[in-house]
Amino acid sequence: MSTPPDLHVAHAERAAALDAADPLATFRDRFIFPDTSSDRVLYFTGNSLGLQPSTAATYVQRELDDWARLAVDGHLSARNPWWSYHHQFKEPLAMIVGGKPQEVVAMNTLTVNLHLMLASFYKPTQERYKVLMVGHEFPSDRYAVASQLQWHGFDPHEGLLEVESAPGTFEITDEQIVSAIESHADSLALVMISAVHYYTGQLFPLDLITRTAHAVGAMVGFDLAHAAGNVQPDLHEVGADFAVWCSYKYLNSGPGGVGGAFVHERHAHRTDLVRLAGWWGNDEATRFHMDHDFVPTPGADGWQLSNAQILPMAAHKASLDIFMEAGMDRIARKRDQLTAFAWDVITDVVADRTDVRIITPADPSRRGAQLSIQFDHHGRAVFDALTRRGVIVDWRVPNVIRMAPAPLYNSFADVAEFGKHLAESLVETAS
Ligand SMILES: Cc1ncc(COP(=O)(O)O)c(C=O)c1O
């Protein structure tokens, strides 16, 4: 069964009107689309690896040139001096995650930062040692938490709790999360959740989670891998203790790019918080005194270990300059429109199919840009057919295609075309 051509015409017309009214439409030209055999590549994988900003090469080359020209003097005399390079990220990252500049830092990579945060904020006792996560969490987070439990002498099978959706459903309800927290009120040390779930695309209620966990005396941390640059986590207001993220997805800063961390200001000056320290976390005023005793820089900067990774940070800067220009509010507004349009297009296309469905929440306040399409069969074949057509989405075992229109470089026309390709791919793979 194929969808009527009229439907695609209607989608294309609606897309044309939305693109014409889109204040961010020209930002698309700031990114480099991959070279494929198709005439027009449709890229919907910004939730995995964001596109390269066209300025990235210039920004990285500038640092290479300064390194060639100045060698060690670049630390102080480069056009963006390397000793303070990471300071440039405070304003954009604060805007992106909803923190204060002192609460955010660009450093390391996501899983490394998660371990650093757990070292400070997961302080189990014999009574209070459990960690609550959501079911089917991204493996790296689960490995990190399980290994931290073991590090402290606890059995992860007992100490790592997972809140699951009801059988046959994919959305984890607020009631399920609250009840899981409250039923372990006396033994819970930490709630550690990905703000946006990598598989289903569900955005969790960060405010409710934080309030409920704090009320029972647990710490709260969020993984923003799929949230940073996508949704607005508003971390300061929400009151999370810490958060970590990567920059290669919606933040378009390149493969393995520099990660980030948030530490709430209530912890900024705490001297009782043990951390795994390094010299770059020492107070800048005395860092080069080479003293024996570690004096942490107040705020998130105090968790840095090593001197800044200038080359990946240059690509990060190229991208965050674009975020500053576009503004997170405008990006979020377009994300809502774009995802709602994608929702309509996909549901129209699969309207007569009982074997294909979107498992991402229908409520826009419970999702970001990603829509996860689940197939009872032939899903992998549909994915392959889409790929042959130049539609870049991703396949996640066992049976989901994830697509994520990114507001900075996807147009509504991209989404309308996706619908046409999806319809044709479904027909092609039906037998
Ligand atoms: C939700 C989530 N957490 C953690 C990671 C791991 O990130 P990294 O390899 O940067 O440590 C990823 C990577 O895709 C992820 O999606």
Image: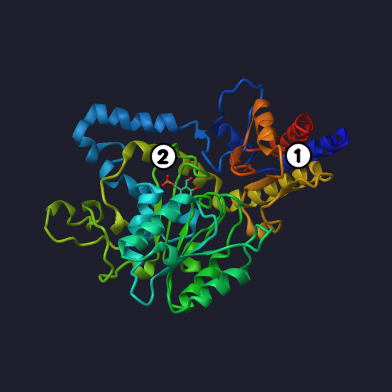
Locate residue 40: give its quadrant. top right
The residue at the point 11 percent across, 57 percent down is 291
Residue denoted by label 1: 15
Tag on residue 350?
none
User: Which of the 4 quarters of the picture holds residue 30?
Assistant: top right
Q: Quadrant of residue 164?
A: bottom right
Dot 1 surroundings within 10 Å: few (below 14), some, or many (20 or more)? many
Q: Inspect this view and state whether residue 92 appears.
A: no
Quick one: 203 or 105, which is closer to the camera? 203
User: Where residue 231 sits: x, y (%)?
Assistant: 57, 54
* Residue 211 percent across, percent down from the top left: 51, 74
Q: Determine whether the residue tagged by mark 1 lies in a helix, strand or loop.
A: helix
Question: Marks 1 and 2, how far apart in space?
Answer: 34 Å
Please name the residue shown 45% across and 37% down the image: 254
- For the C terminus, the quadrant is top right
Residue positioned 49% across, 44% down in the render? 251
State which mark lies toward you, 1 or 2.
2
| Residue 105 percent location from the top left of the image | 37, 53
Pick whichever, 143 or 329, lies toward us: 143
Residue in the foreground of this view, choosing between 308 and 109: 109
Residues tagged 1 and 2 counted as in contact (Cβ below 8 A): no
Q: Is residue 316 left or right of residue 286?
A: right
Amino acid marked by disc 1: Ala
Q: Which residue corresponds to mark 2?
A: 256
Q: Amino acid at mark 2?
A: Gly
Q: Quarter of the image containing the N terminus? A: top right
Does 127 sit above or below residue 144? Answer: below
Secondary element at tag 2: loop
Q: Is mark 2 within 8 Å of ligand 1?
A: yes
Residue 358 image point, x, y percent = 71, 49
